[in-house]
Amino acid sequence: MRTKTHVTAVTAAFLTLRQRLAQRLEKKWSRKLVAALLAGILMAVLAPIGFAQSSVGYLFFIDSAHGYVQTGQIDRDGHFSSIVPASPYWAAGISKVVNTANGLLAYNANNGDAQVVQMRPDGIRIYGGHYSFSAGWTHIVSNGDFLFFYRGTGLGTYFGDGRAAIGYITPDGQWVQTASFVPGSFGLWTHIVATDNNLFFYNNLNGAAAVGYISYNGLFIQTQNFPAGSLPSFSHIVSDGRSLLFYQKQTGAGWVGVIDAPGQLVITQHSVALPAGYSVLVRSDRYLVLHNPNTGGTSIGYVDRIGYQFRVTDQTTFSAGTTRIVSTKDDLFFYFPPPYNNGYGMVAHIDRNGKLQVTHGVANLLSPSLSGWDQIAATAR
């Protein structure tokens, strides 16, 4: 990916940080916000009338080894309950499940099989379109109403070639593609992270990065490029919607950056000290959750809106073995596969003081195959 403006060093952003934040981040309207508003109007007018997915508290479970699927719900009191009994269907081999406003997309990277699933307000599954996509997509990222597909790092016999595609799910559960990009269009990236309005691309092998956004009509617009060597090596990146927390699992070192209104990454903190070993990083509304499945160690914090610094609000430890943590925005769902309590689910929320509060635990949460659920998605971020 290239841009006409050549960014020579990240440190140039440090020198004018306060000026840039004051001038850019305080603007209430930007061309992207206006574009997003226009997109909403156009979609409301032009989209066919249909069922829109429920967006509160539903969970979708997949046992990809055997093809079983099941749904569940977290209620207002933070209690989990299964809604639809597990049943075998099309889900064998599913490698990714991604949520959008109008439905979940389940994708099999080995053969390209894709299924749209929507959740009714009563938790019943509705199956939308079934598609044969290209195999080998390594990243599928939800950004607003759109999904961004990218083939980067190698997967089986499919090797990274920098191709991409963009599209969205309609309210009646159909897939519409808006753009496609030939091999080499996007270079090679190890991480693609969505903020509320942008996509951040990063290669932790060489320190290169780029920023862009998806326009209202589903096209990609690049706004910034960092050449190789611009950023240090980080193992994980998570966003709270505006900010990015960069984290290195081996050392616990981290940075914080924010993408301003014109789509430029500004590094605001480069001395975040956290425990090493976190490998599951999740957004829960304004908070970020960092978890070590091997030890159960967990840190919770947020990026403040004054200096854009990461503030730790809680550090706790619970049982090791979590393989999945998903957020419904109001609650967090932790899943421990068998043999732990024969498959165990734990519901928690982050209180107003930033502390993790456990509200419910449920045992025997496993597939009819007696295996654990390896894919879990929530209908709200």
Image: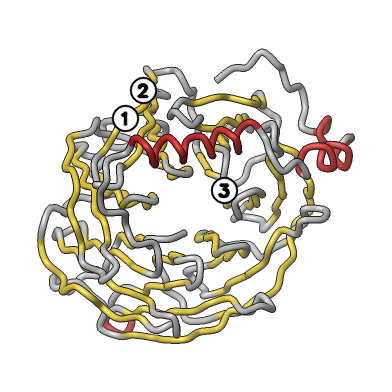
From the viewer's perspective, is residue 287 above or below residue 42?
Answer: below
Q: State the mark number for residue 21.
A: none
Picture quadrant where residue 365 is located: bottom left
Give the Cα distance between marks 1 and 3. 31 Å
Residue at point 56%, 46% (across, down):
196
Mark 3 secondary-structure assignment? loop
Q: Which mark is residue 235?
A: 3
Q: Is residue 33 visible?
A: yes
Count residues near mark 3 (Cα–Cα under 10 Å), then give few for <14, some for 14-19, many for 20+. Answer: some
Q: Quadrant of residue 273?
A: bottom right
Which residue is depicted at the point 50% across and 84% down?
A: 358
Lower position in the chain sequence, tag 2 or tag 3: 2
Residue 267 visible here: no
- Pointer 1: what residue? 177
**Quadrant of the rendered image containing residue 31:** top right
Name the element at disc 2. Answer: strand
Residue marked by disc 2: 180
